[in-house]
Amino acid sequence: MNAPAVTTPTAAAPEKEPGINWADKRYLIVDDFVGVRQLLREALRSLGARHIDQASSGGEAMGLLTRVQYDVILCDFNLGEGKSGQHVLEEARIRGLLMPSCVWLMVSAEKSVEAVMGAAEHQPDAYLIKPITEGVLLTRLNRAWQKKQVFQEIDQAYLEKDYLRAAKLCAEAAGRNKLHEVDLLRMRATLLLKAGETEQARLVYEKVLQERDFNWARTGVGKIRMANGENEAARQMFQGVIAENRFYLDAYDQLARSLQNMGRIEESCDVLERAARMSPNSVPRQRALGTTALKLGNIPLAERAFRKCLQIGEYSIMKTVDAYFGLARVLGQKNDAKEALLLLAAAQRDFSGSMVELRSKITEGLVYHESGDYRRARKSGDELETMLKEDSERPDTATCLEMATLLFAVGVKDAPVELLCYVVRNNDENAVIHDEVQRIFDKARMGDEGAALISTARREASEMMNKGVLLWKTNKLDDAVEWMREARRGLPDNMRILFNSAQVLISHMQATGYNEALMSEANDVLMHVDRIAPGQQRFAQLIEQLQKLIPGRMSAEEIEAELTAAMKDDHDKE
């Protein structure tokens, strides 16, 4: 670092913002230079700040963020070896360690478009270029705090993942605070999307667009249209946003998805490549680019993307084993099985667990098969078949599909058929998955047989769920709870079974009273849903029902009624 972070101002520093009690806030300063940390600390103390923590590295910062809820964070972009400031902000956002009211100021001497855009993708409240004066720092802090303090009442609902309640609080705050109405409406739309309430989110976006043509609102409407299957309309919206602002990267990612949904894979790859050139330090984007290029057979591009993904992911929470497996597939197609196998060994070293071991074995077989070593490919297939017999637990859908593809390729039949039927039972209403399963059957020259198997598997899943629903509707609640537990054990990722299981548990408590064990079970079921398929509308509805069952907990409607009554009282007093 060639210049100090904070310099002595030539003019008087700004006065404290009236009405803000800076003394009771909690602050975190993250910088690898002790002198810079001291200068920033003194600048904050001039405001009256008392609770100031410091971290000299990204890893130390993450340790503090997991233990303390901070009001203000000042973080350097370059933190030496290990996690950068971008990595820290990215991880804090993903892990939900930052409340809506928290202020994050990114401080850096880095002026490149690549660095600024990389940090901006994770939305710091300000990006300050070093060297900065104490006056500039305090001015930007004042401005950011005034903007963010309106979110304080939303923090608790957000922390509890009660997104519908948090969204209603945003609406109340927007009605009282016209200055920050747009920010509150943006947060409201984001929360509604997280809760799966896409229609309500669309109404919020359209309300905002009536006042001003914000790119984020247009992109939000495009996402909803894409989710509703209106891919062409969504594509046009995303392209319109990019035409107006070629640096709005979220629109590129969404445009690529809409094109993929329409089967326009080459165009999707071109969009991802353009976005990756502008902001190359996004692990998910490089992974998506590598995967798409591999699907197209563009081996040089796939290799560059996967290697970049490995490089930038080293200290990122987004570090992904998919990049190891993707690059191994690329190397297999380049007949470089030796480096591919070294990568698979590295994947098992860096990512532990039986699922990684299983996926590594699948990729090993595919590498051998794609490089023409059919004997070793068959050996990998035999080992996978043995693993399937020894462990009744099945992996996720994508892994099952890859495994079935390999097993068919090496001449195995029964095991891949069982895997594909399991996939269909877990996705009994997902037509896209059914089509993919049918293509695998077709490639294995089992087209007609596969179609019949898909139909049977769908019927079996439906019958299993319907029996539990019937028990529930005939008020045999104990039997319904037990049956749905059994259904979850057999089909752990079937969304209809998971949702109905949670509903049965909630109905049981509504009928017989609050039960800690059933509450925990229902919460676990819904958290599993949120992990495998976030943004489901029914998830938000069931979470809200659960919250109402907690003794002494007010519902969102009750909170809304109290706020309305309080506002009426204030008006009457005036």
Image (tube, rainbow, N blue to C red):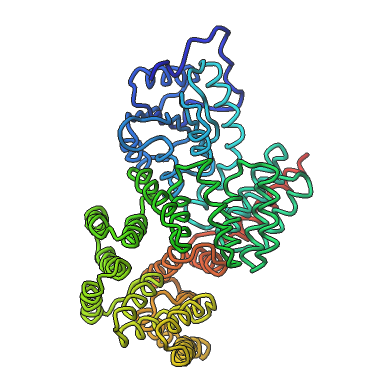
What count of labels does the image hold? Answer: 0
Is 354 situated above or below 290?
below
Is 16 situated above or below 563?
above
- The quadrant the N terminus occupies is top left
Along the viewing direction, whichever of 192 and 91 lies nearer the viewer: 91
The image shows residue 496 at horizontal and vertical percentages of 49, 78
Along the viewing direction, whichever of 372 and 205 lies nearer the viewer: 372
Rendered image quadrant of residue 321: bottom left
* In the image, farthest residue toward the top: 10
- The residue shown at (61%, 48%) is 187
Is 272 situated above or below 374?
above
The image shows residue 158 at horizontal and vertical percentages of 51, 51
Rendered image quadrant of residue 28: top left
- The residue shown at (33%, 20%) is 34
Along the viewing direction, whichever of 544 and 563 lies nearer the viewer: 544
The image shows residue 199 at horizontal and vertical percentages of 67, 63
Rendered image quadrant of residue 516: bottom left
Q: Is residue 127 left or right of residue 312?
A: right
| Residue 549 at least partly seen | yes
Q: Is residue 326 left or right of residue 218?
A: left
- The quadrant the C terminus occupies is top right
The image shows residue 543 at horizontal and vertical percentages of 51, 65
| Residue 468 at least partly seen | no
Is 43 situated above or below 569?
above
Along the viewing direction, whichever of 569 and 376 lies nearer the viewer: 376
